[in-house]
Amino acid sequence: MSRSHESSQPSIYPFIPTDPESPRIRVKRVAQNHTLNQHSSNIHGHAFWELVYCEQAGGFHSLGNQRWEAQSGNLFLIAPYELHDSQLQAQRWVVQFTPEAIAPLPEPSDLNWYWYSPPLNFYRSQISFRYLNWTENYRFGLVHQLQALNTELQLKQLGYKQAARAFLLLIVIEITRMFAQLAPGNLAPRAPLLTEVFMLIDNQYAENLSVEDIAMAVGRSPAYLTTLSRRFTGRTVLEWITERRMAEARRLLLQTDENINVICTRIGYLDPNSFIRLFRKLHGLTPGEWRRINR
């Protein structure tokens, strides 16, 4: 199934769970010269994260103006809504997941780590790091974790949801460590001022909050905060305000039956139509469509 706003635009694939009771994680070992059924052979994007680990050589993966010929041990990372062309023939593992799979929806008072998602944000902010060559000494361990993750999702034994999330988190942490070796010192924001900024966003996102409001509260100019945030996180302060609101919108869509207008007001937007347009731009679906698919 694909979605695009116009026929001339690349397809954006939503995350459609095969089992609504399972964590929002899909794992598949793709045989040599095979493709995933839900993928276009042309440039496309996903409304979720995707990790591709090649056990063999064959084919190529392109992202932006970068192109890699797939070799054994290669790992490719595709962030949500990044347009790419992946024509791989190698035997490979493909892991697809939403941020909720890494940090399952918590109580509203404990959303800070969930919406910030440090490991995933690190990937998103390091544009040049979308490719890793997994060294031979570590390949067996990675494959073992992928197999264990797949087994948990297939067998669904007692506690499989927690176990699947744990294996996925282990994989993400290992990849983060590998990326950190390539970009030492950039693993997480180190500017203390940003901690204060994130706390303000977390406490006031439901109000009519602006970058100017935050800048005034911390005694800096909006331009300074925007530059600082982009430097350390790859996003502007306004984008973080939007992300925090969208995280709460997704929680309310999944965990309540409140209508869209009520949700719009609760997350700090005054105009439901503007909220719906923004949500669709970021997720590829309207809030109502997203709720139906993900519930």
Image (tube, grey):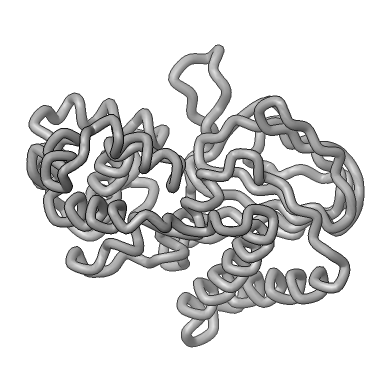
Q: Give how far across and how far down residue 98 sits, in percent.
A: 47, 54
- Residue 173: which quarter of the image? bottom right
Outermost residue on the top side: it is 8
Q: Residue at x 76, y 43 (%)?
A: 35
Q: Position of residue 79 (x, y in %)?
A: 55, 44
Q: Position of residue 142 (x, y in %)?
A: 74, 70
Q: Dividing the picture into quarters, in which one does residue 215 lie?
A: top left
Residue shown at 76%/76% (left/top)? 141
Residue displayed at 17% across by 53% down: 200
Is residue 92 positioned above or below 261 on the image?
Answer: below
Above or below 192: residue 167: below
Answer yes or no: is residue 1 visible. no
Along the line of sight, which residue is nearer the eye, 116 or 162?
A: 116
Residue 180 can be seen in this image? yes
The one of 206 and 180 positioned closer to us in this rendering:
180
200 or 43, nearer to the observer? 200
Q: In the rendered image, which quarter contains the C terminus?
A: bottom left
Q: Is residue 81 left or right of residue 290?
A: right
On the image, which quarter does residue 241 sit in? top left
Q: Reply above or below: 25 against 293.
A: below
Outermost right residue: 57
